Amino acid sequence: MTGRRLDAATADLDPPFAVVDLDAFEANADSLVRRAGGRPIRVASKSVRCRELLRAVLRRPGWRGVMAYTLPEAIWLVRSGITDDVLVGYPTAHRAGIAELAASDELAAAITLMIDSTDQLDLVDAVVAPGARPPLRVCLDLDASWRPLPGVHIGVRRSPVHSPAELAALAAQVVARPGFRLVGVMSYEAHIAGVGDAPPGRPFYGRAVRLVQRRSYRELLRRRATAVAAVRAIADLEFVNGGGTGSVGLTAADPTVTEVTAGSGLFGPTLFDAYRSWRPRPAAYFATSVVRRPGPGLVTVHGGGWIASGPADPSRLPTPVIPPGLRLLPTEGAGEVQTPLAGAAADRLRPGDRVWWRHAKAGELCEHVDALHLLRGEAIERTVPTYRGDGAPAFL
């Protein structure tokens, strides 16, 4: 992507604003399908947060269904006709959402709840009794972390259900309870899908990451196969979900998995620059305006502090990419109101010029803007609302 192309296409717009390059977005979508090797891909809405782009990717071959991040979002997507197949990726405690789900045969047939404990079933029953609702679809969350030694936990802290025996016991409890229907199992290997194995400037750390990922993947293959087989002996599963953008090819090679999830790879944020197996084309950018020049080799832009979630370290900062040669100051970072940048390119910039950035994570970019300007070739093809600009209910 060139600055000339971005500047020319958006000359009439005042920053801050965000642009999605449709050519890169669609190329990334097709590349993910190839990497999935015939497994359908469930799009992670958290990484897109724009109904028009969700609709666009679901029209493409190889993509099927949505993984939502909250129950109110899932209901909104079904009600607005985006999809009739939503897996909520996390357990819910949203009582109004549970009541709305339980009051609708359409929603109950389209939305699958995530659980890792019967306590979550108790919460649903407390909102709407089993006899007063259609059966609700349920997916079990199997912890994919690696525990090579007692007390060692490599991966994220998600489900408490780790062993095949624990998953089978939970499955039996779900099947025995009225008002629920067990339809799926999910096991998300976040320490593989979400951790880059080639971090820039850190070759030894990268080797350690690759070693851990190889060994943990082999362990997960065996454990997931045993766990899913035990559940299939109890319930007729519709799907086994796994993976994320960083592990699509690897997860799809697991014969136990029937579908994979991806979303971040559509936008190609900077966190995915640190992967060897596949790097998406950068598709999403945001623009800020130069407002002053505090000294030689320095320029200040308005805003820029669009920080990504996760550990508070430099990997979560946005990256100035156009013009090339600009960098954040370690003493100030990216500021909410202003951000100073250093580099040779600063001396060529004047107030009113643009600096273009890439966000560290994908969908979180959309929390800062009401719209995405969709670029096709040399021009803006159309402008579409983000969740924030689309009258979405409060999801978080």
Image: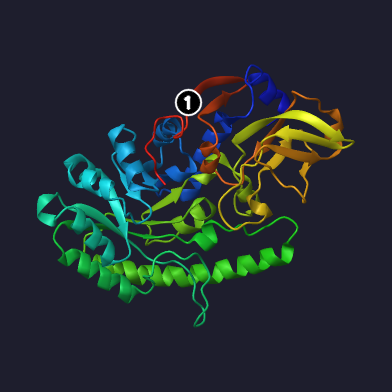
Which image quarter: residue 207? Answer: bottom right
> Vertical placement of 71 versus 293: above or below?
below
Image label count: 1
Q: Is residue 381 left or right of residue 171?
A: right
In the image shown, does 32 or 53 lie closer to the viewer?
53
> Vertical placement of 285 versus 154: above or below?
above
Residue placed furthest toward the left: 131
- Residue 178 in sight in this render: yes
Residue 22 in picture, x, y percent from top left: 55, 29
Secondary structure of the residue carrying tag 1 is: strand
Residue 376 in picture, x, y percent from top left: 57, 24
Which image quarter: residue 195? Answer: bottom right
Instruction: Identify which residue is drawn at 87% across, 37% down.
Output: 297
Residue placed furthest toward the bottom: 150
Residue placed furthest toward the front: 337
> Vertical placement of 362 versus 253: above or below?
above
Residue placed furthest toward the top: 12
Q: Is the image coloured rainbow, by chain, by secondary structure, or in one colour? A: rainbow
Residue 348 in picture, x, y percent from top left: 85, 28
Residue type at tag 1: Val
In the image shown, does 130 or 48 lie closer to the viewer?
130
Residue beneath disc 1: 384
Q: Which quadrant holds the N terminus?
A: top right
In the image shown, does 42 or 369 lie closer to the viewer?
369
Residue 17 in picture, x, y percent from top left: 60, 29
Q: Is residue 328 left or right of residue 107?
A: right
> Vertical placement of 133 versus 6: above or below?
below
